[in-house]
Image (tube, rainbow, N blue to C red):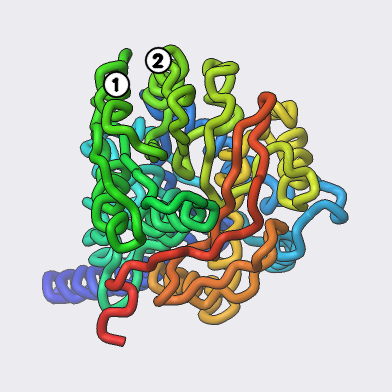
């Protein structure tokens, strides 16, 4: 009899433990009872490696805007964009904080990016910010399978476009649209009777190869003569051969989708070889020349063009620029603007400001306790007229899964990156975005 009672008692304990474990498993990792309300976003970042000179200050921007949204310091509200201020007030009322779970993948290590993603899944993130093209393309099926949305810091490429709904939201419409928009600007300013001649020169990286392929495909459709491509190693100490081969083809313009230390080498080699002196225009891509990489370039960067959506340091008439200066001074890194708040710092700020808005919208719809990657993804593509103080308001949809609705042309002059156009609409969109519509 005692043995029977003992077995029944042990059975009841086992059932009770099973129920408790099931209940615990049903509670999201960010909603443990009695703990601080925290929403985690993963960040595949580059603090070391050949591209860190480009992305390091982008990482600073993400960290500083999170600290601001978490109420760790205050900024005069007169310089805070309306959308960002609304997000901060919402988190304050709901007593919620954002947490950046970051992992340094160096931007060129596929294995580290895979490990980072698995760590983010275990950590319970509801989204990931990812800083480079190849890992984003490879991980896109994983984002879709695990239902964890990603914001990609550059432009879409076709492998990132999932069907029937989007799991990758990019900074701008895409690498192909970037190239097409640049070429459209050239055509708008072209005065000769012949067609402009264009070539593309980049490093051996997915984003650059996409830009090269886009240039080759779109040039004849847009009335250009395509003269060819040059591809350098991702890490290189001399690009003279590539520059001389490209210059020998007599292009009017060379598009250079490269960043980091490789871009520094390219710019200095182009100056030494007097490529611009041959009446050849040189243009850097959206994540190329900024105020940080210009330091080692010095005067060699003078005259280069840049196309991108985020404002430069000299654009103090733009609210986002003024806000970024105050954020840099008061943020945890205590940077000294404008020198330490370059263009890419503002890009990093925008990434996590966008995450902040998406998480806010998701919580308003499903509640903190029910927050999930799927809910945040749905919120991302429901963002409408979000004001971050940069001009066009941000609207994201399934058909336009990107943050900025256009780009500007800039030119390096007297040590500054000066805008030479207003916002330019994208001259091309990937047909995959309207597939099945």
Above or below 383: residue 322: above
What residue appears at the point 48 percent right and 22 percent down from the top-left corner?
Answer: 277
Q: Is residue 324 left or right of residue 207?
A: right
Using the rendered view, name the quadrant where residue 367 is placed. bottom right
Residue 235: which disc?
A: none
Question: Quadrant location of the N terminus?
Answer: bottom left
* Residue 394 spot, x, y in % from top left: 60, 67
Can residue 129 be seen?
Answer: no
Q: Is residue 311 left or right of residue 323?
A: left
Which of marks 1 and 2 precedes in the sequence? 1
Residue beneath disc 1: 244
Front-most of residues 219 and 197? 197
Q: CA distance from mark 2 to mark 1?
A: 8 Å
Residue pushed farthest bottom? Answer: 437
Front-most of residues 120 and 437? 437
What residue appears at the point 24 percent right and 32 percent down from the top-left corner?
Answer: 231
* Residue 173 spot, x, y in % from top left: 43, 61
* Residue 385 spot, x, y in % from top left: 64, 73
Using the rendered view, name the quadrant where residue 412 is placed. top right
Mark 1 secondary-structure assignment: helix
Badge 1: few (under 14), some or many (20 or more) residues near its Cα, within 10 Å? Answer: few
Can residue 300 be seen?
Answer: yes
Question: Quadrant location of the C terminus?
Answer: bottom left
Front-most of residues 360 and 341? 341
Residue beneath disc 2: 273
Asked whether the beta carbons under mark 2 and mark 1 sit within 8 Å of each other, the answer is yes
What residue appears at the point 56 percent right and 39 percent down from the top-left corner?
Answer: 344
Using the rendered view, name the quadrant where residue 37 is placed. bottom right
Front-most of residues 87 and 183? 183
Badge 2: few (under 14), some or many (20 or more) residues near its Cα, within 10 Å? Answer: some
């Amino acid at each position: 009899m005692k043995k029977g009672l003992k077995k029944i008692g042990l059975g009841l304990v086992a059932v009770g433990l099973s129920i408790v474990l099931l209940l615990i498993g049903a509670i999201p990792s960010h909603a443990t009872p009695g703990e601080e309300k925290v929403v985690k976003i993963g960040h595949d970042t580059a603090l070391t490696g050949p591209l860190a000179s480009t992305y390091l200050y982008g990482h600073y921007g993400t960290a500083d805007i999170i600290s601001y949204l978490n109420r760790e310091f205050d900024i005069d509200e007169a310089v805070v964009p309306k959308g960002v201020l609304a997000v901060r007030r919402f988190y304050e009322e709901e007593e919620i904080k954002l947490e950046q779970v970051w992992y340094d993948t160096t931007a060129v290590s596929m294995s580290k990016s895979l490990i980072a993603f698995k760590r983010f899944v275990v950590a319970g993130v509801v989204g990931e910010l990812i800083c480079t093209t190849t890992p984003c393309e490879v991980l896109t099926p994983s984002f879709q399978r695990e239902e964890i949305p990603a914001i990609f810091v550059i432009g879409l490429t076709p492998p990132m476009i999932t069907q029937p709904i989007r799991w990758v939201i990019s900074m701008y419409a895409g690498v192909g649209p970037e190239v097409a928009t640049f070429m459209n600007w050239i055509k708008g300013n072209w005065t000769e009777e012949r067609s402009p001649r264009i070539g593309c020169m980049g490093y051996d990286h997915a984003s650059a190869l996409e830009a090269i392929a886009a240039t080759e495909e779109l040039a004849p459709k847009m009335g250009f003569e395509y003269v060819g491509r040059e591809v350098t190693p991702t890490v290189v100490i001399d690009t003279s051969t590539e520059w001389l081969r490209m210059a020998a083809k007599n292009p009017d313009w060379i598009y250079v989708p490269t960043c980091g230390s490789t871009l520094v080498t390219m710019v200095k080699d182009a100056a030494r070889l007097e490529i611009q002196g041959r009446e050849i225009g040189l243009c850097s891509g959206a994540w190329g020349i900024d105020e940080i990489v210009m330091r080692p370039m010095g005067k060699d960067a003078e005259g280069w063009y840049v196309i991108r959506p985020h404002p430069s340091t000299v654009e103090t008439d733009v609210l986002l620029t003024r806000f970024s200066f105050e954020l840099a001074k008061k943020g945890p890194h205590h940077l000294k603007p404008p020198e330490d708040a370059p263009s890419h710092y503002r890009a990093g700020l925008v990434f996590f400001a966008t995450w902040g808005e998406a998480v806010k919208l998701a919580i308003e719809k499903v509640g903190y306790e029910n927050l999930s990657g799927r809910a945040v993804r749905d919120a991302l593509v429901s963002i409408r007229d979000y004001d971050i103080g940069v001009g066009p308001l941000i609207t994201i949809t399934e058909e336009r899964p990107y943050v900025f609705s256009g780009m500007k042309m800039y030119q390096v002059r007297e040590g500054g990156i000066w805008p030479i156009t207003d916002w330019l609409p994208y001259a091309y969109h990937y047909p995959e975005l309207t597939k099945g519509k």
